Image (cartoon, grey):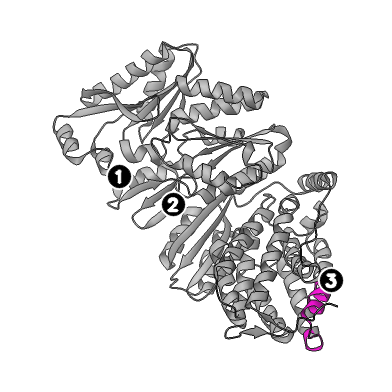
Amino acid sequence: MRIKIKYLNGIRFRRFIVYSAQKVNQMEQYLNDINVFPVADGDTGTNMSLTMHSIVEGAQKCKESSFEGISSAIANSALMGARGNSGAILAQFFQGLAEATRGKVRVTTESFAYAAFQAAEQARKAIAHPREGTIITVMKDWANHLMEHAPHTPDFFDLFKNSLTIAQKSLAHTPQQLKILREAKVVDAGAQGFVNILEGIVDFIEYGKIKSYRIANSARDTIRQLANKAVNSEINFRFCVECLLEKITENKELIRNKISNFGNSLVVAGSESKAHVHIHTNEPEKVLSFLSQVGNLLNTKVDDMLQQHTSIKEVAEVGDIGLVADSTCDLPPEIIEKHHIYLVPIVIHIGKDTYLDKVNMMPSDFLNILTTTSEKLLTSQPPPASFKEIYKQVISRYKNIISIHISEKLSGTIQGAYMGRKDLEGSDKIHIINSKNSTIALGLLIKETAQWIKEGLDLEEILKRLESAIKSSRIFIAVPTLKYIMRSGRLNRTKGLLGTMLNLKPILTLDSEGRIVEAAKVIGRQRVIKKTLDLALSYAKSVKNPRFGIAHVGAPDLANWYSKQISLSFEKAPHPLIVEASPALSLHIGVGGAAIAVLGDI
């Protein structure tokens, strides 16, 4: 005979949440597949799974046994780890639940129902323009049922099981409320995720475990095809911006009003001192600039939804191998988009502010800062979580991943990649490569790999060719001034000042292990320009079929001159790639610097 559950304390509620998170994890790919609203970028399942993972971590670390204690820990963890539109809404729901149960050691069905009703209301208020037929509709219908029936239902199992039926009916009705769902013949993905949370709780109470739920591959493929065919591919706002704000100086409603004109899908969730902001926008830098004025920015994340959407739409055409790189790879944006290259951004620190390379800090923006700011400038490797998030996204669409990164002698980025891969399902399919290079030389290696993937070469052959290409690639970097390399700490200040007095100009390269070494040293700017070209041309003559790339820091005329001289010397070679250098290079060599990379066949 099943024992009735007449109250929930913190320990019981924590168990409910842990098991409901397992249900969401189980449904992650399905939720991704049916994600068509507000943007068909195929990440709702991943975002909800990551949000629930953060919640579970926070709940398990909490040693409290009261409902108030666990609920507060869950709310805080949800706010810290929220991902995506649905994750931000969940975070506000749990924040509302915590506020409504403050001071309670345990809750009855009636007090829980009241708290759930308040939580659903807060979740709705967090959204700038709430739409019916989404997660907030299901939350509302579920909470209304709780409020109506809790006074006559003292057993939590009966209350949850009966209200789950209501939530499932509300979910089934979402296509009738949103045209985009109706055309794609799917339910709302965020609403489905919330119902999965409730299903996980009911499964646990009834069976002591999560019932397995599988969707046949044929059904999943049908859903994906329907969604891709029916959904308008136009994306009005390209970037999904998220961040955590601490010590906020404005209330959430004022923040919401002030940034609502920057885009749509705006959610501002949180408490009086902390807020999680989610918005779709074309101006991520302006959004983050404003937010930095009203609080301390943490956990900033900017996703390119156009790239995500395009990858979903064209996944059948891109083959079996996904390609990942870090943003020290200097390549033109059109090549990155054409070959579906996923970039993990390095982190840029400007004083106390933090930015993501090529996401909310473009090379042109950084160039301006480089010449005007007196703030301390630093770059740091992406955190392992950034790699994990990208890998989970890519491995769901490709059989294998080739992940190519900046030399491990220059950065700990590749260690972050290894840590991000750890414990992932399919981790043995993620092949992490030390390029022993950086900037435009890394870009040439990645472009070459992308071309091999496009040609349909198998994984083993590509890895073999890539190993050979790494050995045959070289880069020569002209450093016009020692000012920036001293500022970045790469050159001892005493030696730098002496070199400046003597007008010495170094030319840098990377050795076979990927370490920075001096290739030559000359006196005067014109000589460093000429010598850099001579070194590159000389190396190019020693290899077969040379390909060239040029990265510059605010020196387009110099880059074009280099390109012209290379084309005169190697008439049959492809026209050199020209690209603005990433902060990883420009921070050290400064304005006027340039690098020439050569990739050849041995």
Q: Name the image quarter holding the N terminus.
A: bottom right
Image point (41%, 30%), residue name:
551
- Amino acid at circle 3: Thr
Between residues 48 and 515, which one lies in front from this camera angle?
Answer: 515
Viewer-nearest residue: 568 or 325? 325
Alpha carbon separation for disc pair 2 and 3 = 45 Å
Residue 234 placement (x, y as % from top left):
68, 47
| Mark drawn on residue 371 | 1
| Boundaries of the magenta span | 150-166
The residue identified by callout 2 is 355
The type of residue carrying mark 1 is: Thr
Amino acid type, label 2:
Tyr
Write down the quadrant of residue 309 in the picture. top right
* Residue 590 visible in the picture: no
C-beta proximity under 8 Å, tags 3 and 1? no
Q: Can you give x and y, in whole percent of width and height, for residue 586 in the image? A: 36, 38
Disc marking residue 165: 3
Main SS class of the magenta portion in the image: helix
Dot 2 surroundings within 10 Å: few (below 14), some, or many (20 or more)?
many
Proximity of marks 2 and 1: CB atoms separated by less than 8 Å: no
> Looking at the image, is mark 2 or mark 1 nearer the viewer?
2
Spatial CA distance of label 2 from label 1 is 17 Å
